[in-house]
Amino acid sequence: NGVSAFISIMRGCDNMCSFCVVPFTRGRERSRDPFSILAEAKDLFDRGYKEVCLLGQNVDSYSWKNPETNININFADLLSMVAETDQSLRVRFSTSHPKDITDQVLHAIKKHDNICNYIHLPIQSGNSEVLERMNRTYDRAWYMERIKAIWSIIPDCAISTDIITGFCGETEAQHKDTLSIMEYVKYDLAYMFKYSERPGTLAEKKYADDIPEQVKSKRLNEIIEKQQKHSEHRNKKHLNEVFLVLIEGVSKRSKEHLFGRNDQNKIVIFPKGKHKRGEYVNILVNRCTSATLFGDVVYN
Ligand code: SF4
């Protein structure tokens, strides 16, 4: 869109989540030279981009050793280095892994105003036995501890997640654990799916895809319904708040309105006035739905 760009910081994945094909299709994890990442961020900024999103299957395991100095650069270091390209360059990242996200990363987000207060932290299931079958390498208690760390270091951080319902052998009680962890976190946003077996995965080899389709659908509907309430609850908390919004373009619903995103990755729609794509504006939020914030530009 000429405003935000993606920068790939690593390839592959060393995790072996049992439902996932990525380890078989993209190979082992390889982290890119941070200086080429910085050069790319600087070049994008010089060409007018206002936001970069650092991309990797598991950004928290980014690791690069300088062959000359032997100094290791981890993801928290990289985030800070990219943020220091320019104060007006927004930095986002995706995807974090609950077993790897460190307090150092959270402190880097807190320290730099231009690193967005938004973390996508896939839970997949709220039940520890299901997580073990998924081979996610964390359990419910670990995940909740990481959420507490986010809340304590970055209190206004938005959190989103991925949820798979109806994974092999998932009981009704285990499904309820997913609903209860959703209740605990109250995610701003969630990507929710029914489990669907992928050929060649560990789950295909080890477990029967034994949850009937109508049970998967019922559980997914319960999850979606809960998430809808939580998204609305989170958005309502933003009423009467002012956010710095980076304008991305004209709203699909009205040519007289623009849309952009705030620091927490929320879509914000407001009257166009004389503003243009790529500008930052302060927006006072006066209305919301579960998906969108609406408001007006405020001038200092
Ligand atoms: S789900 Fe993500 S972390 Fe797990 S194997 Fe696939 S790409 Fe790696």
Image (cartoon, helix red, strand yellow):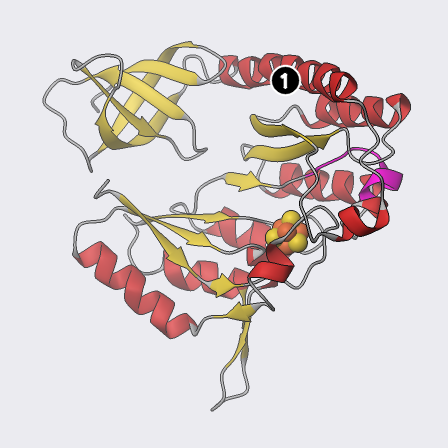
Q: Is residue 140 left or right of residue 110?
A: right
Q: Amino acid at mark 1?
A: Ile
Q: Is residue 248 left or right of residue 192?
A: left
Vertical order, 42 against 153 (above or below): below
- In depth, the one of 278 and 179 nearer the eye is 179
Direction front: furthest residue? 199
| Quarter the N terminus occupies | top left
Total marks drawn? Answer: 1
Confirm whether residue 135 shows in the render. Answer: no
| Quarter the C terminus occupies | top left
Direction top: furthest residue? 287
Residue 30 picture quarter: bottom right
The location of residue 205, given as percent across then percent down, is 80, 51
Vertical order, 38 against 54 (above or below): below
The location of residue 299, given as percent across then percent down, is 20, 22
Residue at figure coordinates x 69%, y 53% from the top left: 200
Q: Is residue 114 left or right of residue 59?
A: left
> Please, what secondary structure does the residue beneath circle 1 have?
helix
Circle 1 residues within 10 Å: few <14, some 14–19, many ≥20: some
Q: Which residues are magenta?
A: 123-131
- In depth, the one of 89 and 180 nearer the eye is 180
Confirm whether residue 66 shows in the render. Answer: yes
The location of residue 26, given as percent across then percent down, is 55, 62
- In depth, the one of 263 and 259 nearer the eye is 259
Q: Is residue 34 left or right of residue 23?
A: left
Residue at figure coordinates x 50%, y 38% from the top left: 118
Residue at figure coordinates x 58%, y 67% from the top left: 29
Q: Name the residue beneath numbered marker 1.
A: 224
Vertical order, 181 against 270 (above or below): below
Asked if ligand 1 lies within 8 A of label 1, the reply is: no
Residue 267 picture quarter: top left
